[in-house]
Each structure stands twice: as structure tokens, then as C-alpha cells.
Image (cartoon, coloured by chain):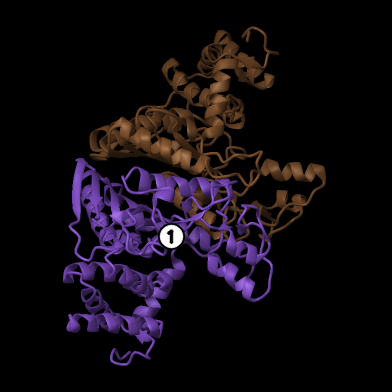
Chain colours: A purple, B brown
Amino acid sequence: MNKDNSTQTVWKEEDLTPLAIRAFVGLGLPHGDAVEVVKVLVQADLFGLSTHGLSRIESYGERLQVNGINAQPNITVQSPALALRLVDGDNGVGPLVGMRALQAAMDAASQCGIGMAFARGSNHFGPISPYSLFAANKGFASIIGSNATTTIAPWGGSDARLGNSPLGFGVPNPGGKPFLLDMAMSVVARAKIRNAFKRGESIPDTWATDQKGVPTTDPKAALDGFLLPIGGHKGYGLALMVDMFAGLLSNAAYLSHVKSWVDAPDEPQNLGHFFILIDTTKLGSPQWLTERMMDFAAILHDSPPADASRPVIVPGEIELEKMQQQKQNGIVLDPAVVELLHQHVKGVSNA
Amino acid sequence: MNKDNSTQTVWKEEDLTPLAIRAFVGLGLPHGDAVEVVKVLVQADLFGLSTHGLSRIESYGERLQVNGINAQPNITVQSPALALRLVDGDNGVGPLVGMRALQAAMDAASQCGIGMAFARGSNHFGPISPYSLFAANKGFASIIGSNATTTIAPWGGSDARLGNSPLGFGVPNPGGKPFLLDMAMSVVARAKIRNAFKRGESIPDTWATDQKGVPTTDPKAALDGFLLPIGGHKGYGLALMVDMFAGLLSNAAYLSHVKSWVDAPDEPQNLGHFFILIDTTKLGSPQWLTERMMDFAAILHDSPPADASRPVIVPGEIELEKMQQQKQNGIVLDPAVVELLHQHVKGVSNA
């Protein structure tokens, strides 16, 4: 709880946020931009999505320091039609570009009922669920997607040509918890295969292929190969569609044109995102929506569980409970992340 | 090729279309409405999606005859915001309501760059890919979804509370083939499990659960149980989100409120759909889009196949090739479907 002691791993949100802002200012961001970036990353940590939270300051920081990401971008927003916004991120930090695009799409949706922002010139923008939550809190339903560095082979192919592109949805609930869905297209994350390998276990042949593109039960071969998409050709198709909306239509890079931030940290990735926002207040009253959302969740929760110890849950439930708990008891952080935040803060005083 | 001989199973589109229109007029539809319905169903047959094509005249016809579907609906379109349309289908035939909603969303998108129609009071509306193709042919990218009769248990649950809701995407290609993705959320269709049962084979435990909600390799138990969604909790979440946009937000029925047309053919289902359309001409020139679409497809096609006999394909490729082939050589139809069309045509003269 004490920000002067970096061995502490539990932080109050109100202490962590200013520390993280100072760290990003230390990396060269204007204060207002750092505020936006930290909103997304702290929200990710609140949700318990620590791999996509403040821990990302490691890769963001490295790339900012070699000018692979632009610390002071001139982000522009064009409006080619009443409800469309084209956001050029000028290679800024991903969550900053994401927040600007979210705001642009909300503005358009306020005006027209539905609004869409296409973002180009961006970078890794964190998880999707923080954006969906911010939108839901203001009454907007959302469909949001991003492309990503290529790690997946086309269905039936044998080399990495598409990203594990995330797609997210949100629906507000004026009188209760919103629904939030944030998913990547692979059956499992790479970490799950790594864990099976460490334990000497085989894996289902639906998780990954070897490097020739052939499904495998050997975790070692899988780690040298490619993650498989959910539902085979279905997840492959979904990942492509996300890239078409986020990359191709947004005039960003797509598929193998997306540069790897691991292989080329000093080069712009030109990632793309899309944000579709719907103003639900145009569809009915808050009472109407609350009633339907409560009923929808109740129908699902009431299904007798196949395993009595695991009741049926709805999308976002785990993350929203984690948030509530961590807002009360503090946010659990890896001490190494806190150490890195402090280092970048010091970067300011040394500058 | 000869429409007077119902044992023929290959039909020219220009002969089949007027026959099908007369059949729907025979079922009580105004001529103009029958034209719209047949556009969708013949397009489904052209794509080779015969389970969702004119064969549906069997269930549509039965329900029209018992007034479970309204043959002469008064479909209304409200505009609660510049880019939003609320379509009340008045329990009309699904593809008619679908075509009206598609048109309403295209009108809104022409005006604002993006437009969305929510449809309620509808019925089974055919496959999604015909709508995506019609939109793509006019320069619109699309995201379209519908809810459906409940056949799937919530993830970890043990009774049918959500539908195998389809979700579709389309991206136009002014100089070549569009991308079309039309998918339901189950790993496989029920027919695939039925076939395994007939052959006495076991099935992967990722396809379905038994009636207690426990994954099974026994096709018999699976047929008594529930289809599993792609990617487990991911496909479950996706199916829910489709229902939230198509049913909950559109003020239609959702989840177990959707009535089964099999159990209650004479009652309105109040199905819901959503259509999000984006006018791609606002994003760049036809040349710009064609170039990017061609490059996108080429990157995927160029991935060396894991199995040399099965080159990598892109979403919609199979259906668009089938269409090209059947436009040239004729549409293959089950003689029983043709017989049914003729019976309903006769219904006119007997009326």
C-alpha cells in the first residue's frame, strides 16, 4: 500500500495512478497523454488482466526509448462522413491512440446514434475491455477490434500471416453490471502450451500445429509452430474480418505488413483498430435497458450447472468482480513492474 | 432446366426465380414482397447453402398456412437517430423483414457513412451471406447477426437457453471478389454428429455435451444433449453478444423468450436481427480498396499449404465459386423442393 516501498505488491488505485502517470511522463509523454494511457492500463490491472496492464510499460518503454513509438504524436481526426472518424495516431502509444479513437467514435455516436472510428498509425493498445467499460459507463454499446503482430498461420497454411486479433463487445446496464466480452481468436494462449510442456503433458490436437502447419499433441512442436484459431476455419475467418476492419479499411498495415515490435522495436508498426459505438439511450429508457439486461443475465445464471461447483457465468463477470475487489483491497502488482515505474519516474528528474 | 418437369433437379436462375415468386404469392404474399424473399433464398441456393435456400419454403409455408407467420405484414421503419433504424417486421417472412432492414441500414449508411438497423418481430431470415453480398455489391462493408431458437446450453450449464446465433461479415472488392464470412457459433452442425452416429463412430469431446451438460464422445448422447460453441466460453460469449445486439437491443425476444417454430409453428417467434453497414466509398477510392483487397487475398493464398492438395482459401471463396458455376450451369435443387414450389403455385389458382 506504500508507494515508497517497491517490494509491496498491493497498491491503492489512487496511489498507483499518479505513479504510473509520472512514469510515462518520464518516458517523454505530455502529462495529459500519460493520463489517458494510464487510464487504460490501470483499468486492465483492476480487471486482473495483468499481462495487458501496467506491465506493458516494459515493451512500451523500450520502444519509446529507441523512438519506435512516438512520445509526442500529433494525433489527427478526420470526419469523411457524419458518423465516421478517421484517426491517424502518428505512431503514438497504443492506449493513447485508442482513447482518442474511442472518444471520436462516441462523439459521432452521440450525434448520429451509431458512430465508428478507424484508427491507423497505432501500436499495441492494451486489452479491449477497458474501452468497452468506459463506453458502457456512458451508455454506449460497442464492438471494438484491433489487428496484431502475425503469429497465426492461415487455416491450412504453414507460416505466420495473421495476428491473434482481439475482438470485443460491450453492452451497458444502467442499473447493474454491463456485459463485456474481450477475446482473441486462438483456442488457448501460448502460455498454456508452455505450461503443458513444463509439466511433460501432451496437449489436445485442437490447440496448435507444428511448424509445418500440422495439428500436434506435442507441446514442444506446438511451441515451434502456430496457435490454432477457435472453431478452425471459423476463428480463422473471424481473425481475418477483424484485420479487414481494423487494418485494411482503416488504411493501417494488415496481415504480414504489420511489423513485429519484438523483431523491430525501433520501427513503427502501423497497427489499426476500429471502434463501433451505439448510443443505447436512443433505443429505449434506462429502465427498459436495465430490466432487459437483468432478465438476460438471470436466464443464464438460472441454468443448472453441469458441475455444481461451477455456476454459469456471463461475459465480463469475472473481470468486474475482480475490479470491485481490487478497488476495495488494492491492486495486486508484480514488484518488477513497480520497480520499472519508479525507474521511469526517475528518468524525469535525470532529464 | 425445364420448369414443367419437377423431376429435373437443375434449374436456370431465370426459370427458378419466377416459379419461387409464384409459390410465395400462392402462400398469400404480395408480389413485391415475394420478390424480396426469393432474392435471398435463391441467392442461398446459388451459394450452395441448400439447407437455407428455397427448401425453407417447407417450414415457412407451414407457418404461413397456420398464420404463425404473417403473409401481409405492415413493416414499419422508425429513425430514432440520424444513422439508426428500428424495423418492426410485424411477424412477416424473415427474408422480407431482413431485406427491408438491410435497405434501411444502407439508407442510413449512405447518409452518415455508417448506419444500423435493428429488426424485431421477425422470423428465420435465411443465411447471412446473401445480405452481405447484396451490400458488398453496392460498396458497403457489413456486420450482420440474428438470434435463433434456443438449442445451446450456457457454457457450464445444462439446458438449452441460447440459440446457435449466426454472425456474418462482408467487405466489398470493387475490382474482384468480396470477402464474406457467415458462421454459427457451434463447432459443428448437428448433421455431422448424426452422420457419426450412423457410421458408429465416436466424436471429439469438443463437439457436444450429453443432456447433463457434460462433454461426450458418444454421438447418441450428443444428439440427446447440446452442441458446444467454438472455443468453449469464447463461442458462448460471442453467441450471447449476437443475441444482445439482435434480440435484447432490438426489442425483440432473446434467449429462451424466443419461441420454437417447431414446437409452436402457429405463434410469432419475435426473432431479432441487426445490420451494421459501412459505406466504404467514404474511406477511399475504388482503386485503393481493390488494391488492398487483392493484396490481402494474395498474402493468404501464398501461404504454402500444410496439405498440398488443399490450398489456403479465404472466407466466401467456396460460396462465390459455387455461385459462378451454378449461374452458368444451373442451380441444383432437391426435386422435393421443386414439387413443393409447384404445389404452392397451384394454391393460387385454387384460391
Residue B292 spot, x, y in % from top left: 37, 38
The answer to whether any part of residue A48 appears in the image is no
Above or below, B76 against B345 in this view is below
A90 left or right of A125 in image: left
**What residue does disc 1 label?**
A182
Image point (64%, 7%), residue name = B4
Q: Residues within 10 Å of mark 1 (few under 14, many from 20)?
A: many
Residue that appears at 60% across and 15% down: B11
> At label 1, which amino acid type do we have?
Asp
Q: Is residue A88 left or right of residue B13?
A: left
Residue A62 versus residue A323: which sits nearer the camera? A62
Residue A219 x %, y %: 64, 66
Choose between A274 and A23: the one closer to the eye.
A23
x 30%, y 47%: residue: A283
Quadrant containing the C terminus of chain A is bottom left
| Disc 1 secondary structure class | strand
